[in-house]
Amino acid sequence: MVVSVEGRCPAAHLDDPTSCSGPVAVTVLDAHNAGADGCEHHAARLLASLDGGRVYALPDAPAGAAVRTFRAADGIRPFCWLDGPRMDPSQLSRAENRARHSH
């Protein structure tokens, strides 16, 4: 298992106070193919904060890890560990933006 210096996976943002949810299972890539391996929890939070990000399961990942991460990211607001009012579409989850536009 790959672990960062802080004892959390490499996908965990330095300002995100949450702990890992399990082993490093997926890789999240941004639109330029820069990436980080992470647990499903931190990978979903990272993916939610990227525009055009993708997620791939690592070879030894539990079945469905990438799909669970992708689905979780859909309901997470970008940089969800930041406080304050969040009304701008870029600050809302993909699911919240879809719901706003479906009316």
Image (cartoon, grey):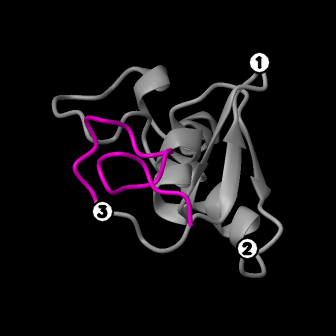
Tell me, yes or no, whether the highlighted magenta stretch contains residue 15. Answer: yes
Out of 3 and 80, give the one closest to the viewer: 3
Residue closer to the observer: 56 or 70: 56
Q: Residue at x 67, y 43 (%)?
A: 28
Q: Nearer the viewer, residue 31 or 88?
A: 31
The residue segment tinted magenta is 1-18
Kindly identify which residue carries mark 1: 32
- Report the residue at 25% width, 35% height from top: 15
CA gap, disc 2 and disc 1: 24 Å
In the rendered image, is residue 102 in sight?
Answer: yes
Circle 3/circle 1 CB separation < 8 Å: no
Q: Quadrant of residue 85?
A: top left
Q: Quadrant of residue 77?
A: top left
Amino acid tagged 3: Ser
Q: Amino acid at mark 1?
A: His
Q: Position of residue 47 (x, y in %)?
A: 59, 41
N-terminal of the two: label 3 or label 1? 3
Task: Residue 6: say if magenta.
Answer: yes
Sequence-wise, the earlier of marks 3 and 2 is 3
Q: Is residue 54 above or below residue 9?
A: above
- How would you rate the neighbour count of disc 2 (Cα within 10 Å): few for under 14, some for 14-19, many for 20 or more? some
Judged from this view, the residue extending furthest toward the bottom is: 63
Q: Which residue is mark 2?
A: 61
Cα separation between marks 3 and 2:
19 Å
Q: Which mark is residue 91?
A: none
Q: Is label 2 in a helix, a strand or a loop?
A: loop
Q: Position of residue 103 (x, y in %)?
A: 59, 40
Question: Circle 3: is it few (<14), some (14-19), or many (20+) Cα within 10 Å?
Answer: few
In the shown orientation, is residue 71 left or right of residue 15?
Answer: right
Q: Which residue is mark 3?
A: 19
Quadrant of image for the N terminus: bottom right
